Amino acid sequence: MHFKLLYLVSVFLIFENTSLSKYAGVFTASLAMVLLPVVTGFLILSKKKIGKVEKHIIFLYVALFLYSLLILIFNYYDNLRIGFLVDRGLRFALLALPTLIFFVFFCSFEKETLERALLIFSISILIIYVSNILFPSIFNASSFFQGSYAHSPHRMRGLTLEASTFGFQVGIAAIFLARHYDLSRIMSFLLICVAIYITTSKGGLITFSLSFLIAVLFHKKTVKTTKSLLLFSFLVLSPILYLEILLPAFSSDIEKYNSSATRSTMILVSIFSLFDHPLGVGFFGYLPSIYENGKEVIQSIEEIMPNVFNYKEVSTYLYFGAVKGVSTKSFIFDWLIYFGGIFLFYLYKVVKWYINNLREGDFYYLVMFLFMLLSVTFYLPIDGRFIVPLVLAFLYKSICNKNKYNRELA
């Protein structure tokens, strides 16, 4: 029964923009949220013991929530809008909880089972990808599985809100399938680049290309001749990639849209917040930090690059009481505002552990981790994107299995 639940979750998590969002926004947008009570019940009733890492993560979440309450009491006790801050802060804390629960759930399975779940996810994404090319009107229209009409009908969005998140899904699925079917690295690089390019996700294309390059440089088992060949191919393709694809896309974005201005501004807001509050502002101080630092960041950018960006969208985030769409659009930078140096400390430990182990193991697993890391750093929040905890749990179990095997050999 629990295996079927896992496989069902691996399909449901593909649907990131259902009409269920009308009940609680991002919190209920993913179809996988329907299964959250069942998953929680399974964890409570299961005879399997929760591992030490999972227990540590749960303890850390509780500790950070209590830390947020202390900041609220000492910093905002006299704020006339403290009710508003409590309401929004609780929402931010609740947004993080399903990702934590799903990660603990995924970690209750063995590596082989999680691998089958990822295969189901990847094949499903492949089917959706082909269907989106053949029947784009189905994915652009509003329905139960797509809670809103497509903002940019010429871009592929699959069963997510926009092209950037679908590009991420496609990237994860393509990397996994390349590993599963043992494709050559050069062929994999070219095919995955083309696949992500067709989705029109600039962030996905850049982060995958960088991930592949970094993995080639860092992976210990890649022989020097292969590294040289892959690096040469990357260097030859990079100017074409930049001049013919990325530069026109960014120019078009700056002229017609606001995403470049919004993302760059909100990332800098996170960094400015770190200067003022090295240990973060907690869940309840997140919005005041954005309100306070946003205008200063825009002014600083304008002094360096006057009249380059369009701040129409991001300006709507910077008055007290604004909530719709207000975020850094990045998991890493959101949590940098929440918990500052505390978060950076744990992030460093986790990333170091994964990379140190993966660089001695499977090349594609290293690419997958780097792709996910760069994506959640520069353009992807993880709220409602439960593929992230699934991939993290799978890679975690893969590393544990490998280390256990090595100890047995020793």
Image (tube, grey):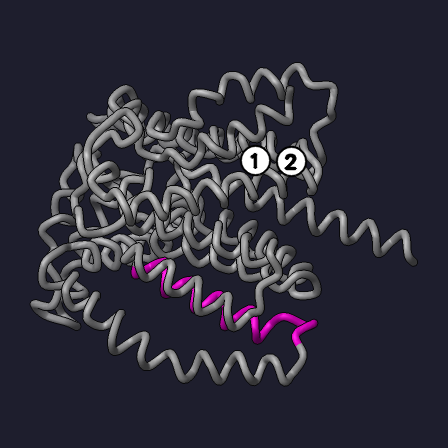
Quarter of the image with the C terminus in it: bottom right
For residue 171, above or below residue 29? below
* Residue 123 shows in the view: yes
**Residue ID for mark 1:** 103
For residue 220, above or below residue 70? below
Does the magenta-highlighted stretch encompass residue 213? yes
Task: Give how far apart the Cα atoms at labels 1 and 2 are.
Answer: 6 Å
Q: Residue at x 58, y 64 (%)?
A: 183
* Region rendered in magenta: 202-222
Does the magenta-highlighted stretch encompass residue 43? no
For residue 83, above or below residue 185? above
Judge left or right: residue 409 versus residue 89.
right
* Residue 74 shows in the view: no
Are the residues tagged 1 and 2 within 8 Å (C-beta)? yes
Tell me which corner region of the image, top left, top right, bottom left or bottom right, holds residue 181: bottom right
Crowding near pointer 2: few (<14 within 10 Å), some, many (20+)? many
Crowding near pointer 1: few (<14 within 10 Å), some, many (20+)? many
Q: Residue at x 74, y 48 (%)?
A: 400
Question: Looking at this view, is 281 or 130 the one in front?
Answer: 130
Main secondary-structure element of the magenta-colored stretch = helix
Q: Position of residue 343 (x, y in %)?
A: 49, 48
Tell me which corner region of the image, top left, top right, bottom left or bottom right, holds residue 96: top left
> The residue tagged with tag 1: helix, strand or loop?
helix
